[in-house]
Amino acid sequence: MNAPEHRSADSAPVTLARLEGKVDAALAAQTARLEEHARRLDATDRITAAHSVSIGDLERNAAAGTRAGTSGWTIASVVVSSIVGLGSLLAVLVTLVRAIPGAP
C-alpha cells in the first residue's frame, strides 16, 4: 500500500515540472505573437504618419490655390490617341462605303 502513495508523492513534482514547462512554452508563444503584433502596429503607425504628412501637403496646396500641372507627355499622348482614333473611325467609314454600294 505504500507503493501507490510513494508514487503519487514522486509524481507531484514531476507533474508540476511538466506543467511549468507547458506554461513556459505557452508564455513564449504568446510573447512571440505579441511581439509580432507590436511590429505590425509600428509599421502601420509609420504608414499612417507618412499618409498624414501627404494629406497635410495636399491640404496646404489646395488652400494656396496651386495645383499640379499637366505633363507635356500626357498632352501629347492624348493628341496622338485622338488622331489614331479618328483615323480608325475614318477607315471604318471608308470600308462601309465600299462594302455597301448604295450608301452615300
Image (cartoon, rainbow, N blue to C red):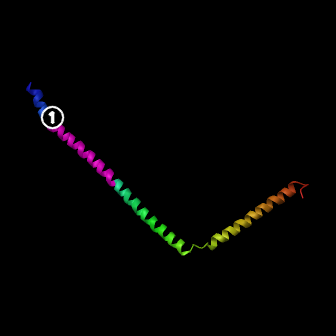
Q: Position of residue 72 (x, y in %)?
A: 63, 73
Looking at the image, which residue is at 54% across and 71% down?
62
The residue tagged 1 is: 11
Q: Quadrant of residue 91?
A: bottom right
Q: Quadrant of the N terminus?
A: top left
Mark 1: few/some/many CA within 10 Å (<14, 14-19, 20+): few
Inspect the magenta stretch and tell me whether residue 40 lies in it. Answer: no
Q: Position of residue 31 (x, y in %)?
A: 29, 51
Q: Which residues are magenta?
A: 13-35
Looking at the image, which residue is at 74% across and 67% down?
83
Q: Classify residue 76 as left or right of residue 103.
A: left
Compared to 39, does 55 lie above or below? below
Q: Position of residue 101 (x, y in %)?
A: 90, 55
Q: Quadrant of the C terminus?
A: bottom right
The residue lying furthest to the front in this view is: 63
Q: Position of residue 50 (x, y in %)?
A: 44, 66
Q: Classify residue 18 as left or right of residue 65.
A: left
